[in-house]
Image (cartoon, helix red, strand yellow):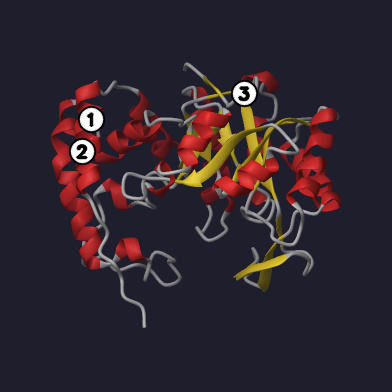
């Protein structure tokens, strides 16, 4: 699979990355270990050699599974993208939200990226991932309690030591990116982006193109909504955080499916699913380096990989964009 250069670095990534959030179990219910390892290996076997994970995904579980899956593979044959900056071990940092650990015990999550913590997290990730370097180390969320310069001085130190190849950010505003660039050469910004969630196009993408950063979109299928399988009367399970989210009101599900009906003929022409066409379109958007797509088992990996098995013409890409341009969310009123 042809790889893409990540920003101004020498890190090359596949157009689709294996998103390892779900297999960690945190907020997703997890996956059985054998199935999770098989999914990662199946992605590798079909050429999806870029893997995105994070310490908080299962509180080390996701990184551990990635390490087990890749053990014995030539280290230069795959790329590991992981993160730092979420703290559940102490009360240091900016409170983020309440959660539960792998045993169902209530915990509090804080955004914290102090220098000592950044280095500690990296060392722990290296151990769990069974590797001596990380291809891309990203701050997971901005931390208002730590100067950005302090955070990235720590990352630069790790780069100088050969433990990290390149630095990236997640969920950073253009102003935060500008500040970080005063300390370090960033190569990526990982942000939510989908056909119906395109806010980054106004300023984040132009900045990335200007500064030489690659965009790494997550949630390209808007957590399943862009598969076309969710109907207006869908009942979400207990604890599913999509319940009550503005994208999943009955009216917005209806609007999304109406938009998907417009691009259905393109999917049928390529013998592809709607999800595969949506992923392909996202991969071809300006500034995009690689798109994160999760999978719990090897069947889902095979389905995802088919998104790379056909080429959308410029006319087809334009038609999909035109359909997306007409889409608008119903504004949800809050009391």
Q: Between disc 2 and disc 3, whose residue precedes?
A: 3
Count how many numbered circles sit on residues in the image.
3
Mark 2 falls on what kind of element?
A: helix
Mark 3 falls on what kind of element?
A: loop
Q: Position of residue 90 (x, y in %)?
A: 79, 67
Viewport quadrant of the C terminus: bottom left
Mark 1 falls on what kind of element?
A: helix
Q: Residues within 10 Å of mark 2 (few under 14, many from 20)?
A: some
CA–CA distance between discs 2 and 3? 31 Å
Relative placement, left or right, of 185 versus 161 is: left
Which residue appears farthest toward the top when viewing the image?
2
Relative placement, left or right, of 231 versus 44 is: left
User: Pointers 1 and 3 in contact (CB under 8 A)?
Assistant: no
Relative placement, left or right, of 231 versus 144 is: left
- For this rendering, which residue is in front, 87 or 72? 87
Residue at image mark 2? 322
Q: Position of residue 258 (x, y in %)?
A: 16, 51
Q: What residue lies at 25% left-to-right and 37% top-to-bottom?
A: 321
Q: Position of residue 242 (x, y in %)?
A: 39, 64
Residue 318: image tag: 1
Residue at image mark 3? 8
- For this rendering, which residue is in front, 257 or 145? 145
Instruction: Please say whether residue 188 is visible from this viewpoint.
Output: yes
């Amino acid at each position: 699979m042809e790889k893409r250069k990540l920003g101004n670095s020498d890190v090359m990534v596949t157009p689709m990355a294996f998103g390892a959030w779900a297999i960690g179990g945190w907020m997703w219910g997890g996956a059985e270990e054998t199935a999770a390892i098989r999914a990662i290996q199946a992605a590798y076997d079909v050429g999806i050699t870029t893997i995105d994970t994070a310490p908080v995904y299962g509180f080390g579980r996701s990184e551990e599974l990635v390490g087990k899956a890749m053990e014995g593979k030539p280290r230069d044959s795959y790329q590991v993208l992981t993160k730092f900056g979420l703290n559940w071990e102490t009360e240091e940092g900016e409170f983020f939200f309440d959660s539960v650990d792998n045993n169902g015990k209530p915990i509090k999550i804080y955004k914290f990226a102090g220098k000592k913590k950044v280095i500690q997290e990296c060392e722990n990730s290296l151990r769990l991932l069974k590797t001596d370097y990380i291809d891309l180390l990203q701050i997971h969320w901005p931390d208002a309690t730590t100067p950005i310069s302090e955070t990235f001085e720590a990352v630069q130190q790790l780069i100088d030591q050969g433990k990290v190849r390149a630095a990236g950010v997640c969920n950073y505003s253009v102003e935060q990116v500008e500040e970080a660039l005063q300390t370090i050469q960033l190569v990526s910004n990982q942000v939510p982006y989908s056909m119906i969630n395109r806010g980054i196009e106004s300023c984040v993408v132009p900045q990335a193109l200007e500064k030489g950063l690659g965009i790494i979109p997550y949630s390209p299928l808007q957590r399943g909504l862009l598969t076309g399988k969710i109907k207006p009367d869908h009942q979400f399970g207990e604890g599913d955080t999509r319940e009550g989210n503005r994208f999943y009101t009955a009216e917005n599900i209806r609007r999304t499916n109406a938009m998907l009906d417009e691009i259905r003929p393109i999917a049928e022409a390529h013998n592809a699913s709607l999800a595969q066409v949506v992923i392909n379109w996202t991969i071809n958007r300006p500034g995009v380096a690689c798109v994160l797509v999760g999978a719990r088992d090897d069947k889902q990996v095979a389905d995802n990989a088919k998104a790379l098995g056909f080429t959308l013409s410029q006319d087809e890409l334009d038609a999909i964009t035109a359909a997306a341009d007409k889409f608008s969310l119903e504004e949800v009123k809050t009391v």
